Image: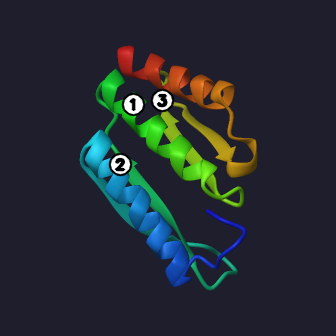
C-alpha cells in the first residue's frame, strides 16, 4: 500500500507490477489478486508467494526491502499461518525499513518453514 497514490493510479500499478516481476525473478512463482477496500474506490493487492525454502524466503525479503526503500510512503503487510494454525501478521513501512525489522520478520517466517 501507499499513502502517495490511489490504489488504481497507473503509477502505483506500475510499481506493484515491478515488485511482482522482481519476486518472480528472484523468489519463484507468485500470484496476485485484488481485495476490494470497504469505503474506498480502490482495492489492495494480495500477493501469494510459496515460501518453501530458506533461499526463497531470503530472496523475497530482499525484494521487499528494496521495494520499500524506494518510496517512504509504501507499506507491506505479510500474513502467514503459524504451526498452531493461528494467523500472524507483520507490517513494515517504507519510512521504518531497517535491517532488524526485516530480519525479525524473516526469522519468524523461517521458523514456520523449518517446522
Residue at 33% across / 58% down in the picture? Answer: 21
Q: Is residue 56 above or below residue 37?
A: above
Q: In the rendering, at what x and y percent does residue 27 appear?
A: 31, 40
Residue at 48% across / 74% down in the picture? Answer: 13
Q: Is residue 5 above or below residue 59?
A: below
Q: Earlier in the sequence, mark 2 or mark 3?
A: 2
How far apart are labels 1 and 2 at the CA level?
Answer: 10 Å
> Alpha-carbon neighbours of circle 3 within 10 Å: few (<14), some, or many (≥20)?
few
Identify the residue under disc 2: 23
> Alpha-carbon neighbours of circle 2 within 10 Å: few (<14), some, or many (≥20)?
many
Q: What residue occupies the far front of the structure in this picture?
A: 70
Q: Quadrant of residue 115?
A: top left
Q: Is residue 112 above or below residue 6?
A: above
Q: Point out which mark residue 85 bears.
A: 3
Say what secondary structure mark 3 lies in.
Answer: loop
For the residues labelled 1 and 3, say whether their Cβ atoms are less than 8 Å apart. Answer: no
Residue at 62% across / 48% down in the picture? Answer: 69
Q: Quadrant of residue 73?
A: bottom right
Is 57 placed left or right of 8 in the picture? left
Q: Point out which mark residue 57 bears.
A: 1
How far apart are labels 1 and 3 at the CA level?
Answer: 20 Å
Q: Earlier in the sequence, mark 1 or mark 3?
A: 1
Q: In the rendering, at what x and y percent does residue 7 appear?
A: 58, 76
Q: Earlier in the sequence, mark 1 or mark 2?
A: 2
Is 73 placed left or right of 37 in the picture? right
Q: Is residue 55 above or below residue 26?
A: above
> Alpha-carbon neighbours of circle 1 within 10 Å: few (<14), some, or many (≥20)?
many
For the residues labelled 2 and 3, say whether their Cβ atoms are less than 8 Å apart. Answer: no
Amino acid at each position: 500500500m501507499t499513502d502517495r497514490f490511489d490504489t488504481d493510479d497507473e503509477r502505483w500499478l506500475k510499481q506493484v507490477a515491478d515488485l511482482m516481476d522482481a519476486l518472480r525473478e528472484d523468489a519463484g512463482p507468485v500470484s496476485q489478486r485484488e481485495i476490494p477496500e470497504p469505503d474506498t474506490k480502490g482495492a489492495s493487492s494480495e500477493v501469494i508467494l510459496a515460501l518453501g525454502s530458506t533461499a526463497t524466503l531470503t530472496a523475497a525479503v530482499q525484494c521487499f526491502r528494496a521495494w520499500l526503500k524506494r518510496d517512504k510512503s509504501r507499506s507491506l503487510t505479510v500474513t502467514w499461518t503459524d504451526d498452531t494454525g493461528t494467523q500472524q501478521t507483520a507490517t513494515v513501512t517504507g519510512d521504518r525499513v531497517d535491517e532488524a525489522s526485516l530480519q525479525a520478520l524473516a526469522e519468524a517466517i523461517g521458523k514456520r518453514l523449518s517446522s
